[in-house]
Amino acid sequence: MNFNYTLIGQLLAFILFVWFCMKYVWPPMLQILEEREKEISDGLDAASKGKRELEEAETKKAEVMGAAKKEAAELINQANLRANQMVEDAKSKAQEEADRIKESAEKDVVQSMNKAREGLRSEVAVLAVAGAEKLLKAEIDQEANASLIDEIAGEL
């Protein structure tokens, strides 16, 4: 065998092998590689999009938490103000009730004093008439007695 023919045969076999690979092996491999590259690219895009959405959600969460804390503080302040107002209302109602009871008690005392004065006037009048009767040793009739008692009670 001649070395040149061997070399030419090997060259033809290699060219045939390259042509076969370019025709039947290479396109599916390129297609698989391109699909894989696209999947990786899509995955990276989705990961970056997810990261952005996570950051946006974190900022939104911080805003919502801040607003909720502010609203809670406002509600607590309103509740405290309402509680203070209710305490003040209760104090004023209690003071009004105490004043009313005091006035009622004062009226009762004045009434009792007036009744006691009237009772004392009648007793003093009866005692005065009895004393005068004893002094005079004369009997005065009941009608005159009653008129004298009324007259003395009026003077007292």
Image (cartoon, rainbow, N blue to C red):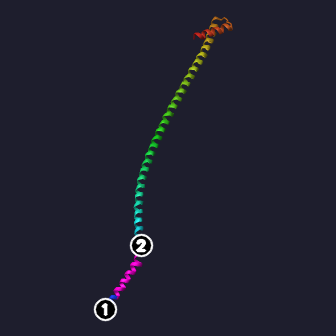
The reply to whether the magenta stretch includes residue 16 is: yes
Q: Label for residue 28? A: none
Mark 2 closeness class: few <14, some 14–19, many ≥20 residues within 10 Å? few
| Range covered by the magenta-colored residues | 9-27
Q: Amino acid at mark 1?
A: Phe
- Quarter of the image for residue 26 reads bottom left
Q: Which secondary structure lies at badge 1?
A: helix
Looking at this view, is 54 or 6 the one in front? 6
Q: CA distance from mark 2 to mark 1?
A: 40 Å
Residue 18: x, y in percent? Answer: 37, 81
Query: Which comes sooner in the sequence, label 2 or label 1?
Result: 1
Magenta span main SS: helix
Q: Residue at point 48% right, 38% down?
A: 82
The quadrant the N terminus occupies is: bottom left
The quadrant the C terminus occupies is: top right
Residue 112: x, y in percent? Answer: 58, 20
- Quarter of the image for residue 58 reads bottom left
Circles 2 and 1, Cβ within 8 Å, touching? The answer is: no
Residue linked to disc 2: 31
Residue linked to disc 1: 3
Vertical comparison of 72 with 48: above or below: above
Q: Residue at point 66% right, 8% down?
A: 145
Looking at this view, is 80 or 152 the one in front? 80
